[in-house]
Amino acid sequence: MFIAKYKKIFLSLSIILVVISLIFIFTFSLKPGIDFKGGALLEVSYSALRPEISLIENRVKTLDIGQALIQPTGDKGYLVKTRDLSQAEHESLFQAASIDGKYPAEEKSFTSIGPSVGNELARKAIFSIIAVIIAIILFITYAFRKVSLPVASWKYGVITVITLLHDIIIPTGIFALLAHYTGAEVDTLFVLALLTILGLSVHDKIVVFDRIRENLREDNDNKKKDFSETVGTSTGQTIVRSINITLTIIFVLVPLYLFGPETTKNFSLILTIGLFFGIYSSLFFASPLLIWVEEWQAKSKKK
């Protein structure tokens, strides 16, 4: 199977992608949205012509509300992000966005989150990701408890977590690069996208590992193949199924990104990227890594 034959190429490619993504993350950093740092988000939609963004920026500058980020949404709307606002400041901001009634506007939504709530959400988001990773290790260790040779069951769990980190680091790095140029911010939907990637990606890896487990039992009984050949054959047996399932989900996410509301675009984009690299890692990173671990163990025993 070519996966076993070219495992060094696949492993090297994954490592390069992760390193580049980490460079993007640390170079451009991730900007927390109002969900995590607190602030206000106003969405307005105009019934007729939408004013130029410069007009709104000039009007907002006259208000004593600090820096504001204004982004177009759809064909006739704007998103205005500011610090946490009082009721009076909220009304003044809406009047500024409608240019004091010169451009009839409708307030589609207004969200205000205090800094303490934002910090609490950030802590819960980090805890959720850590808890999911720990739960995955424990579950896979238990599920593969009867598979002890040639690779111990707990190593399947560790390999899964390594590949899952691969699956979330790469889309996060791509998002950091895009955010540097578009001003996109990390919000709760971004965290939800990462958690969804973890869930769907671990499903793919369990399917691959389960096929390896079943083939190992058969090969051990009949003494047919070595470990790398078994892993390669098992991965080949799951390729079509894994790709079809992932593409089905991506086919739903692409229209959501193209035609959905502005607030869900980043969610659908990150989820699409994460699913793509998730299926890649299940087939071309997790399996080669498993083979590499077995070969490293064999070399260690000989020494």
Image: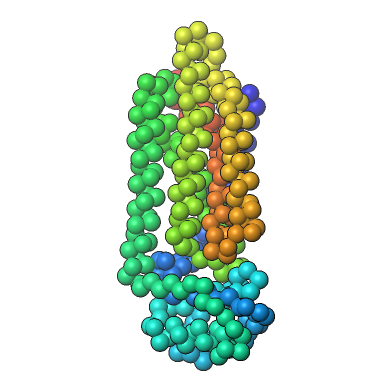
Identify the residue shown where x is 54% and y is 60%.
Answer: 264
Residue 203, percent from left and from top: 48, 36
Q: Residue furthest right?
A: 49
Question: Which quarter of the figure is the C terminus placed in?
Answer: top left
10 lies above or below 250: above
Residue 217 visible in the current orientation: yes
Q: Quarter-wise, where is residue 73 in the image?
A: bottom right
Question: Which quarter of the figure is the N terminus placed in?
Answer: top right
Q: Quarter-wise, where is residue 113 in the image?
A: bottom left
Foreground residue among 158 and 300: 158
184 lies above or below 234: below
Identify the residue shown where x is 50% and y is 49%.
Answer: 168
14 lies above or below 125: above
Identify the residue shown where x is 55% and y is 31%.
Answer: 288
Residue 26, percent from left and from top: 50, 61
Identify the residue shown where x is 40% and y is 21%.
Answer: 147
Residue 231, percent from left and from top: 54, 24
Give the colour scheme shown. Answer: rainbow
Apparent side of residue 278 relative to residue 83 in the rendered image (left or right): right
Foreground residue among 238 and 44: 44
Residue 189, percent from left and from top: 47, 58
Foreground residue among 206 and 48: 48
